[in-house]
Amino acid sequence: MRQCRGIGAWEWWGTWTYCFLLWWNIGTAQIRYTISEELKEGSVVGNVAKDIGLEASELINRKLRIASESGTSYFNVDLGKGELMVNERIDREKLCGQRAACILPLQIVIENPLQLHRLEIEIQDINDNAPHFNLQDSILKIAESITPVGARFPLESASDPDVGSNSLHTYNLNKNECFRLNVKTFDDGRIVPELIVEKALDREKQPVHQLILTALDGGKPVKSGTTIINVQVQDINDNEPKFEQTTYKATVKENSVIGNNVVTIKATDLDEGTNGDVQYFFGAHTSDLVKNLFSVNSNSGEITVIGQIDYEETKVYRFDVTAKDKGTPELEGHSSVQVTILDENDNAPEISLTSPPSSLTEDAHIGTVVALINVKDPDSGDNGKVQVNVETGSPFKLKPSFENHYSLVTDAVLDRETYPEYNVHVSAYDSGSPSLKTNTVIKVKILDVNDNAPSFSQSSYNVYIKENNAAGMSLFSVSATDIDQDTNAKVVYSITDSKFQEIPISSYFYINSDNGTLYSMNSFDYEKIKFFQIIVQAKDLGSPPLTSNTTVHVFIMDQNDNVPAVIYPSAVMGSVSHQRMPRSAKTGHLVTKVTAVDADSGHNAWISYRLAEATDSSLFAVNLYTGEVRTKRSVSEQDDSSQRLLIEIKDNGEPVQSTTVTVDILIEDGLHEPISDFKQKSTEKDKKNSKITFYLILSLASVSVLSLLTFFILLIKCARDSRGNGSCCISRDSDGYKNPNRNLQIQLNTDGPIKYVEVLGGDMMSQSQSFGSYLSPVSEFSDLTFVKPSSTLDFKDTLRGLDASLPDSAWTFECQQVRTKYNYFKHNSPYRTIW
């Protein structure tokens, strides 16, 4: 149970009553302390930490502080002990005036997390003020003789700012022969002294009577105040004016216009002439505040408004009025006026922040407290009833704490990338007619959290570089953006840990971690490596970091850096090839066939043959694309038996690469041409069996047409299925793209669009063979003009890259080209035995 502190010099019963009240407040879950005014600075009021259930060690970290609605810091908290102490002098009369109960409302604000407790301090009065008269010396005029015994004259009332038993209690009058004192108590608790004439006055015996009026309060010890009343005895006029009412009551609205009539007072005098002519005035002790707000017409007695009346400042005005005649001596009558002020809805609600708004992270939970709001309206009744709301569509709402106190809390999920800051519009309106409204804007800043991964502009990139590139050259730049903020949006780039031919891909390429620029670490050779697949990762610097990946397909483009290589005649046979032919050879006789390959690709690998030199250039010719050496005419007896041909082989690259081969041809007599003999025998046989041959040819043609029709039907079906399967001529399995007979692989090589394919054959003399098919620009049958060795290690990666980069239509077209070249090459290649 909290201790009773700051009681001062109270008696035992006062102390017991104070502790009982304090215990009662605890029992009703209301933190309330009672202290007396004028306590010394540093006096302990109570232990707030203990009363709100906190340990003293928590106070500093949780930043406990005291907030006052009045803005004056009368108290502070010792954060070491948790005790509430008086911070400055407290004057109850200044703070609460004449109100019976003086309650000072405070808020205990605790942060981390934010909490609010209500605290009330009841300030009890001590007898620190003595009764006081406004005038220390006054004059009272009373007519002699004609003033009846028992006549009453109101005297100036004393004021005492203390309340309760410490306030004004009674009056005393010094002993005299002619007057006595009477004390009147009104319904509102006012105590007014009256002077009563006890004995007829005789001006000739004593023209002036000096009286001492003493005001006493009820405090212990008693305090008092005095004033001197000089009673001047006057002669003649023996009837004083009399008011119709002892108290006039009126009501007036606040903010009434100047000149508005409040009430009219009236008094009558039985005398005649000037002795009965009455004028009206404020009472002698009327305050300046009343005189600044109201005026009394001295002739008509009409009381009107002359100042700005405010209900919130004073709700009731009470003052005395006097009616005086013009006799000699003049006589006067007295009455009082009570003006009640009616409230109007002239004050809009006031919105104040008990705790300033705090910044929120965008992942804040729903219900997180943002700020504490206090709303008040000084009007009364419905005019002072206030309702508060937040604009619709805002992710915040108001949660009531206790009377006129609210917590602004989150009501939806926040996203800084959408709204980095909110202007929360809070509206407060009263229930008056018309209703008055107040708006305020609370700015809430949203702090970023790392909730967005970097995003690449593309899911994959295709990069084309020429072979023999310089090591260290810049190839390409990838870019990723992160919509987060500060370090959460800072992106660094890296290459993921992958391998190419058992070698880390980072050995081939390097990426700048800051700007995403990709560099080559080596010079590439198209004939060895044609394709790379690089996984680039973008990672932000948030905590925890977020990542995203993109794929960079690097295609090595061919350059014409290889000279055509002669396959036949073989180099093991020497630099000169020796061939024989019969002298009986006719025009078009096939002497030999020169075959060469070029390690390059595309146009760079297109090979052409030319007869550079010959013993007799009129006898032989070389096919430009096939390399076949045939006779241009029949061999005559005059032709030399030894002929030498120099054949030049060159590619179609830029610049052109070429080589030569020498062929020696020996023309021999008696050497028969097998083909001619066969034709001659066939001709003789055909003459004997012409009818059988006709039917055989007809049957063969029918079967051929039927086979061709079946082939085209299957080809169309394959082309339709290829849209879903990817290819009609190449099947995909776990080992890559292969021909179903498992002895043939077809490799597509690209330099941008597909220009040629490589057909990879099975074993031949225990060595893997690769045959490149090159599309001759003028070939009538899409001839496979030459074959060449090639590596198959990168076949899978190449096709995967092509899958990603080529449309379906282009892929189907290339498949058809492969099928045509494959069939032709299989049946016409000098190496067809490997098939």
Image (cartoon, rainbow, N blue to C red):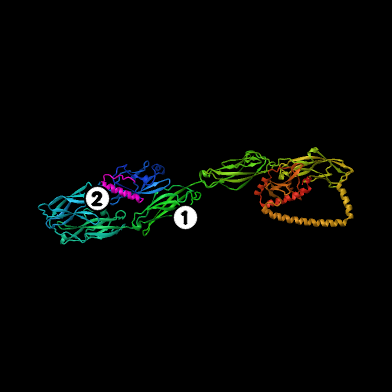
Chain part drawn in magenta = 1-29
Residue type, mark 1 in image? Gly
Near-viewer residue (643 or 378): 378
x 21%, y 61%: residue? 244
User: How many numbered marks appear?
Assistant: 2
Q: Earlier in the sequence, mark 1 or mark 2?
A: 2
- Is 26 covered by the magenta stretch? yes
Cβ–Cβ under 8 Å for marks 1 and 2: no
Instruction: Name the residue beneath numbered marker 1.
Output: 393
**Mark number, residue 803:** none
User: In the rendered image of this protein, does residue 762 appear above or below residue 714?
Assistant: above
**What is the spatial separation of the Cα atoms under label 1 and label 2, in whole angstroms?**
57 Å
Near-viewer residue (459 or 243): 459
Near-viewer residue (510 or 184): 184
Residue 249 seen in this snapshot: yes
Residue 740 screen position, x and y as percent = 72, 49
Instruction: Name the residue beneath numbered marker 2.
Output: 165
User: In the rendered image of this protein, does residue 291 appear above or below residue 477?
Assistant: below
Left or right of residue 72: residue 170: left
User: Label 2 neighbourhood size at 10 Å, few (<14), some (14-19), many (20+)?
Assistant: some
